[in-house]
Image (spheres, grey):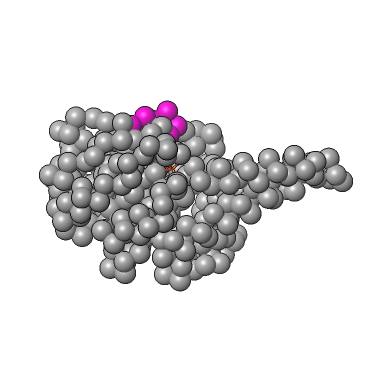
Amino acid sequence: MGLVSAKEMLNKAVAGGYAVGHFNINNLEWTKAILQTAQELQSPVILGVSEGAAKYMCGYTTVASMVKAMLEELNITVPVALHLDHGTYEGAKKAIAAGFSSIQYDGGHAPIEENLQKTAEFVKICEEKGLSLEAEVGSIGGEEDGVIGAGELADPVQCKTIADLGITMLAAGIGNIHGKYPANWQGLNFEVLSQIHNACSGKPLVLHGGTGIPADMVKKAISLGVAKVNVNTECQLAFAAATRKYIEEGKDEQGKGYDPRKLLAPGFQAIKDTVKEKMELFGSIGKA
Ligand code: 13P
């Protein structure tokens, strides 16, 4: 199966009371680890690509070509969406042209009128091309690839206005933060989440900053309409820890332990384990 829009998988997730994982990719190993895990567990999956990661991987066309080829070569049959994460206006247009199947246009930092106008433009483009579209209201806290948010809480009225434009899914700040959560973090704001859920009448909601949110909070968020959970930092931490262990144990100096296929293997497995753990928590296993 080639790339698909995230629309059907997310609507099914809302109906079934589970969420689909969005896992950010950074290179070939990352992509392969996530796709193989999704296939083994028969789970739908969304591959997230930030603009910084796309640049690192030599551009949107390189990323789209790599992912499409991997679906074929690895015989991936579960639904896979290739999604631009926190896209700018220009970045979203480039990712669409390169063949991404899902787009986030993140106008959360712009004045609401501009956000609405540009989101409406992408609704039209994505509808014509059969792509899914994520919109954002109120920036998500923390820092990701130079994008800094202030941990805002979205306004449910604005959420309804943007949801009514015809988007596929909505990211709305509910106290979530990208990266590691500080020790004094207040937790997710479920009151705001349920107001947004009610205002947007069943529209799939997106929880950014999936790293480090306690399991009970994630489950409660899913019960209140979250159908997509974004995870990035947790895979990076798992990869880094496993790679550090390999080197600290001197394994790169034993035999041909310096071969990148050996050196990167523990990190690769650590990403697989993390993705599996998240898919179990989100309830998406067996839902392909
Ligand atoms: P984390 O890095 O905190 O997991 O957040 C990922 C994310 O929200 C991507 O948009």
Instruction: Give the residue at x 77% y 43%.
Output: 249
Could you tell me residue 63's position as x and y percent? 51, 44
The quadrant where residue 33 appears:
bottom right
Q: Name the quadrant where ligand 1 sits.
A: top left
Instruction: Give the residue at x 56% y 67%.
Output: 40
Answer whether residue 17 is magenta in the image: no
Answer whether residue 146 is magenta in the image: yes
Could you tell me residue 272's position as x and y percent? 58, 56
In this view of the protein, can residue 218 be seen by the observer? yes
Judge from the rendering whether residue 286 lies leftward or rightward of residue 30; answer left or right.
left
Decide whether the magenta segment is chiefly helix, strand or loop.
strand
In the picture, the quarter occupied by the C terminus is bottom left
Along the line of sight, which residue is nearer the eye, 13 or 60? 13
> Which segment did they paint magenta?
144-149
Number of numbered discs:
0
Instruction: Give the residue at x 35% y 54%.
Output: 217
The extreme front residue here reads: 184
Could you tell me residue 76's position as x and y percent? 53, 63
The quadrant where residue 247 appears:
top right
Could you tell me residue 199's position as x and y percent? 14, 53
In this view of the protein, can residue 6 be seen by the observer? no
Instruction: Give the residue at x 35% y 59%.
Output: 219
Judge from the rendering whether residue 238 lies leftward or rightward of residue 127; answer left or right.
right
Tell me: residue 35, above or below residue 56: below
The extreme right residue here reads: 255
Tell me: residue 9, above or below residue 181: below
